[in-house]
Image (cartoon, rainbow, N blue to C red):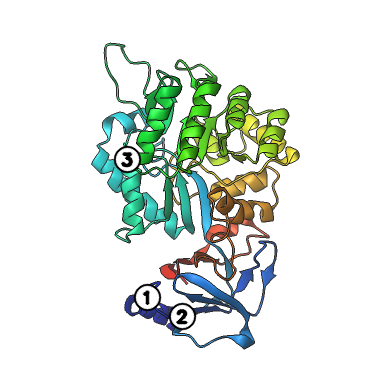
Amino acid sequence: MRAPVFFAFLWLLLGAPGAGAATLLLRGGRVLDAEGGRWLDGRVVVLEAGRIRAVLPEAQAVPADSSIDLEGLYLVPGLIDLHTHLLLHPYNEALWDDQVLKEALEFRTLRASVAARRTLEAGWTTIRDLGTEGAGFADVALRDAIAARLIPGPRLFVVTRAIVAVDCYGPSAFDRRWDVPQGAQEVNGADGMRAAVRAQIAAGADWIKVYADYPRTRGAGARPTLTLEELRAAVDEARAAALPVAAHAVTDEAIERCVEAGVRSIEHGLEVSTKVLRLMRGHGVVLCPTLAAYEATARYAGWKPGDPEPEVLRHSRAAFARALEAGTAIGCGSDAGVFAHGDNVRELELMVAYGMSRMQALRAATSGAAAVLGLGEECGRIAPGFRADLVAVRGDPLQDIAALRQVALVLQEGRVVRSQR
């Protein structure tokens, strides 16, 4: 271990992380500017009490308790993923039905704690986890354990159980004599929706998630499931507690209902039309396209790169292109859990492959994602007063977005959580 890194760890262990007046300097690296579009050379980033105190020219560096040499590295804000499922693991390891029905809650929670650590060590310092998929309120426990520093992991925003229409989710296709546990909370009617939202808020939800459409029978295509009245009830009840709503929505009709109801983000959006994308833009609704999940499920079904693309990939590519053309806000939401946690960068790689600039993709996982979470004034930029959630990588992600995989250093609120030089 190089001496500066050693002294940074000594500061971490002896200086009460994130507390007091201990000051850490990051020097020698190329620093992404506050707008996320260019590199600043010859800068020192000053960290104190878990925040960025200043970004100074090298000649103006202040006295500090310790420093870390970032020579040859690129410093970016901690990455943010707006769509994950820590309580799931890749479907080629175990089918979704088997995870929901056969894996013990305790085992799933312990596995999720490992997934949280892997995600953080890959440079993702904040995530929105969009449903426990049959694991109750385990995400609340994970969030609180991470916040208390009992286990390592990204800052979590959680939705608990998610909400679905009665008989419109899974596991499904069982003999109707059996009462099979569901992967989300079922509701019927606006009053039922309000009751479910209230219960999830009381249990600790940071967001509310609804499934606005889903296949009604196994093998069928998605169809709208929640009425406009039910969606409005969800948004209204969440708004009363100052919480936003995210909506799983694939079909154009369901997405339009969600926008009219006032949701904050649309997850997937596979069949969204240009008309509805423009409606989303006008209402400030963000699209999280989950491109990496579509690719993963195609691979599990036998597709390999170089083969003709299956229909789902053609549709996801086309929907993403329409969103870019329409100017709809796009956030990084990968659906990690469908594929391996820690591989979240795949979403950004596909965004770029499908036509987004590298700068736009990086913003979608930093300042843009922070704004969706209501953290636009404290996360997602390297600027004074912002959280010291930072990642140093070995390559230039504005030239090659895959450079975000080459993580050398991760800091969370000024604490070194990974150092691999």
Q: Nearer the viewer, residue 377 or 214?
A: 377
Q: How much space separates mark 3 and mark 2, taking CA atoms?
A: 38 Å
- Specify which label sits upstream in the sequence, 3 or 2: 2
Mark 1 lies on residue:
12
Give the SS element for disc 1. Answer: helix
Q: Nearer the viewer, residue 353 or 303?
A: 353
Q: Amino acid at mark 3?
A: Phe
Nearer to us of marks 2 and 1 is: 2
Residue 403 in the image, given as x and y percentages of width and height: 59, 60
Give the SS element for disc 2. Answer: strand
Q: Amino acid at mark 2?
A: Thr
Write down the quadrant of residue 377 in the picture: bottom right
Q: Is residue 240 visible?
A: yes
Residue 77, relative to residue 188: is it above or below? below
Q: Nearer the viewer, residue 359 or 252?
A: 252
Residue 404, relative to residue 175: is it above or below? below
Mark 3 lies on residue:
137
Crowding near the residue tagged with mark 1, few <14, some 14–19, many ≥20 C-alpha atoms within 10 Å: some
- Answer left or right for 189 relative to 175: right
Q: Amino acid at mark 1?
A: Leu
Mark 2 lies on residue:
23
Residue 374 in the image, given as x and y percentages of width and height: 54, 51
- Answer left or right for 397 relative to 85: right
Nearer to us of marks 3 and 1 is: 3
Q: Nearer the viewer, residue 403 or 417?
A: 417
Label 3–label 2 contact, CB within 8 A: no
Q: How much space separates mark 2 and mark 1, taking CA atoms?
A: 11 Å
Q: Residue at the spot x=47%, y=54% of the render?
A: 126
Crowding near the residue tagged with mark 2, few <14, some 14–19, many ≥20 C-alpha atoms within 10 Å: many
Q: How much space separates mark 3 and mark 1, taking CA atoms?
A: 32 Å
- Specify which label sits upstream in the sequence, 3 or 1: 1
Label 3–label 1 contact, CB within 8 A: no
